[in-house]
Image (cartoon, grey):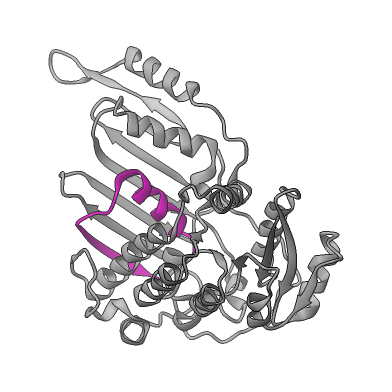
Amino acid sequence: MLGVAVLGTGAIARIHVDGFLAFPDRCEIKTLCDTYPEKAAALAKEKNILSVQCCSDYREAAERNDIDLVAICLPPSAHAEAALYALNSGKHVLIEKPMACSLEECDSILKAARASGKKVSVVAQNRFLTPMMRLKKVIDSAESGKILHAAVNSYWWRGNNYYDLWWRGTWEQESGGCTINHAVHHADLLLWMMGMPDQVQAYFTNLDHQNSETEDFSTAVLKYQDGSVAQLTASLVHHGEEQEIVFQCEKARISFPWKVYASTALENGFPNRDEDTEKKLQQLYESIPSLAYEGHTAQIHDVLSSLETGSSLAADGEAGRKTLELIFGIYKSAQSLSPVTFPIEADDPFYRSETMLPMLPRFNKKTKSLDNFATTSITLGRKT
């Protein structure tokens, strides 16, 4: 039985708690930790885990002998410090996105994991959706042919008051806007399916969120070594949140949400629908079994299984770092209005926070700051 500590008891922590409670014979939440201990106590009561101990200092939780795994649900600026303390205390860690606030912090976490022999998983819950997993397997099968162009639309909508929470909308506390805190999911999925690009060119701005220093819109063009191209657009101004990932391949168009369309050429080069290819890809997609668990619960299942059996993590710290390298490359390109090539080296200003943050624009001045919201419900984007 693995002992679990959850650090931070805001909205996303509730989803982690529910995930751990789905496996009562494999793990037990021993402690909930929050700067506001009354929030931790309220969450324990809400979830009927009254035997749990609550505390206000994450170090106290990480040092406990009955803790094996620490789930970090704190504001982004606290991720690296908490992860390092937990790893150096001999605990495995599950870190909410983004993994950290700089590549330097990511590398410190990975170094500490290697030194301690402990595991790091970074939340990428959308990998653990049946439609997304099926799409990945169809791509890996090569039945649709080489990817020529990918369009990733990380479309979200947030009201202006979303940024009233104290840590949101500041480069120092959140490390950015929609690109790092919303499109991080879609960036992870793109890299999972296509790998790291060679180059990116990007643009960002703030269109409609006056209480945020950071961007609420960005768009980037990614170039790959094999000649393929991808586009990644992040937004907090899209009503309907119609998120999608579309792959235009040699033989067909396939996407999340799932859709397949294939064309073949007429004698004059104009398109004619290729129903045989569509049928073949549809049958392949439907033949792939559904996942037993989905979302955060599925990733927690993966982490528990890895700790129990020694199997590899499906979303590890290296993957979390690559996602941030792409995002910081987008920020660098948007700030400089020029292409950026990968990798981002340790002597690059965008490798560490203290040199990167002063270079980034403050689109607006943050003028309102709340400790907490009364409402704790959140949405996590499309699942189908």
- Residue sitting at 42 percent across and 21 percent down? 284
Compared with 240, 269 (above or below) is above
Q: Is residue 307 visible?
A: yes
- Residue sitting at 34 percent across and 45 percent down? 151
- Percent across and percent down for residue 54 are 78, 75
Magenta stretch encompasses residue 189: yes
The picture quadrant where one finds residue 363 is: bottom left
- Residue sitting at 75 percent across and 66 percent down? 30
How many marks the image carries: the answer is 0
In the picture, measured across the screen, residue 23 lies left or right of residue 95, that is right
Q: Quadrant of the C terminus?
A: top right
Which is nearer the eye, 96 or 204?
96
Compared with 212, 154 (above or below) is above
Which is nearer the eye, 308 or 326?
308
The picture quadrant where one finds residue 362 is: bottom left
Q: Quadrant of the N terminus?
A: bottom right
The picture quadrant where one finds residue 218 is: bottom left
Compared with 105, 119 (above or below) is above
- Percent across and percent down for residue 372 are 70, 77
Which is nearer the eye, 354 or 232?
354
- Residue sitting at 46 percent across and 55 percent down? 185
- Percent across and percent down for residue 220 are 29, 58
Q: Which residues are magenta?
A: 181-206
Q: Is residue 370 visible?
A: no
- Percent across and percent down for residue 196 are 27, 54
